[in-house]
Amino acid sequence: MASAPLLDVSTVLDLPAPLPLDSGQSLPGVRISYEAYGRLNAARDNAIFICHALTGDQHVVTDHPRTGKPGWWVRMVGPGKPIDTDRYYVICANVIGSCMGSTGPASLAMDGCPWAMRFPVITIRDMVRGHVALLDALGIEQLHAVVGGSMGGMQALSLAANFPERTRAALVIASTARHSAQNIAFHEVGRQAIMADPEWREGEYYAYGKGPEKGLSVARMAAHITYLSEAGLTDKFGRRLQNRAEKTFGFDADFQIESYLRHQGISFTDRFDANSYLYITRAMDYFDLAEEHGGLLANAFARSKARWCLVSFDTDWLYPTAESRLIAHALNAAGLPVSFVELSAPYGHDSFLLDVPALDKVVGGFLG
Amino acid sequence: MSAPGTTRALRPDLAVIAANVAPGASVLDVGCGDGTLMQALAQDKGCPTRGMELDPADVATCVGKGLSVIQGDADADLAFYPDGSVDYAILSQTLQTTKRPDKVLEDLLRIGRKAFVSFPNFAHWKVRTSLLWNGRMPVTKLLPVAWYETPNIHHLTVNDFRELVKQRGITVEGAWFLGEGGGERSAAAANWRAEHAVFLLSRG
């Protein structure tokens, strides 16, 4: 995968002009790869834009082209489901910086070589600029709603705050308006693991047929822990041993949890580009919606007229409930119609992807 | 089922509140439960409504109905609402469950230009006789939960409430006293005969 990490199985849009970035640079030759389901109505006002998470992609309900696994939100999106493709035109685009068809560090720059670390550092708002360019191209002036979980929630926040005329509603699940020191710390561990791998070669690994898979794998292992709850881990693995009756007094994966994490790490390297991981985690760390608006979160929503809904999960310690409540209070202070609920679910941060019937009810009810 | 435009089967204190909210007035329902009052006000009177509710299942139900409801606690989360953000702040059957009812009351009158407050009257004659004859904390139809698990941590009477609002210089713009079955009781006999009281308050 290291030499050809791009897959263009989705519909693509090549932006006619360079994309301006928060860094002050601009990104030329941007391609945005997206999937769309359902039908855009004549008034072009029934579109829902779904924003994906850090390692997610545009394959919301279609099988993942590399892993063959079902789309990441099949339980939420489809005919008759809470995000109903019989009623809504549902779009999801791979974020810029990623590696599933949209322009990222593994894409070829104008000189025909991969961008690698020459790729500019991007932000959540830059990703959203890409989304808005796609909406422009599709002739969609205003979304029925923008929806996202985790990093997708950050994009939903950013889109509804920075492009308030582009959406009538925003649904932000298991997310935050800023990355905390702890969030940044976990990401830094991941990045350092990648950059400490000699195969990383300062990001110029594409020509070698092999990338920093060990480093990327460790990054994924560390991050994966943050997506699960302590109780969930105990429940699923406890201290159970992996296919053995006794401890080996060695450093094999004696425990099931070790084996599970190693598997998660290794399989991740088959589908994700290490440099993309660096760039996207950086974008998340830079995210602070209040900072973009003079330090006061309520100011970020001053021009919004949207309906808002925030959902958190009681076992999510990555973006705990307090973060969502902070956003809800700021929206309230801005006088906007806002709902906020903390749902009970055992799966930690990943609850937004898993079987939580109360979430279906909230999502379906909010979208109407 | 009730005909459109008529007030649906609301709890008696909620029916009083619904009947006395001005059409089109904005409302914050603190402790909104499953959103019954908000729905009634939105549909029958065209009121823009918002709610706050502690129970996540109730919040999910409200959001499922398309209502704007924040999961929160009257003691902690009212502080985040700006001054004068709604015409009416409503607190029904919740005052006696708060940690600091007096502060919650002040918050309601800061957030709303007016406030509706309803509560069960602990001085109703049935409660009094139950306490007198049994010498135990009353468990009645109105107060159905034993002392150790009741959410009602600040029991109050109609006269207690009258005294508090007087002390704080709050204006009583209206008061309704409900007996068994929701029938109204006179103000003079309310402390004995009212099971529920509804007050409409303002800062004068």
Image (tube, rainbow, N blue to C red):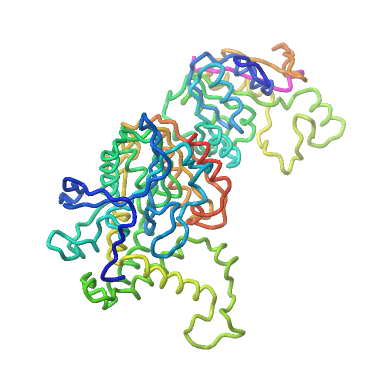
Q: Quadrant of residue A307?
A: top left
Which residue is pictured at 16% across the width and 45% down the height? A17
Does A190 sit left or right of B126 as displayed?
Answer: left
**Residue A357 place in picture, x, y as percent:** 58, 47
**Residue A221 place in picture, x, y as percent:** 42, 69
Q: Quadrant of residue B171?
A: top right
Question: Residue lying farthest right?
Answer: B133
Write the start and end of the magenta stretch as one range: B193-204
Tell me if residue A133 is in the magenta stretch: no
Does B102 sit left or right of B150 as displayed?
Answer: left
Question: Residue lying farthest left?
Answer: A111
Please say if A351 is above or below B93.
below
Q: Nearer the viewer, residue A249 or B194?
A: A249
Q: Nearer the viewer, residue A96 or B77?
A: A96
Q: Nearer the viewer, residue B121 or A186?
A: A186
Does B85 sit left or right of A6 as displayed?
Answer: right
Please say if B25 is above or below A17.
above
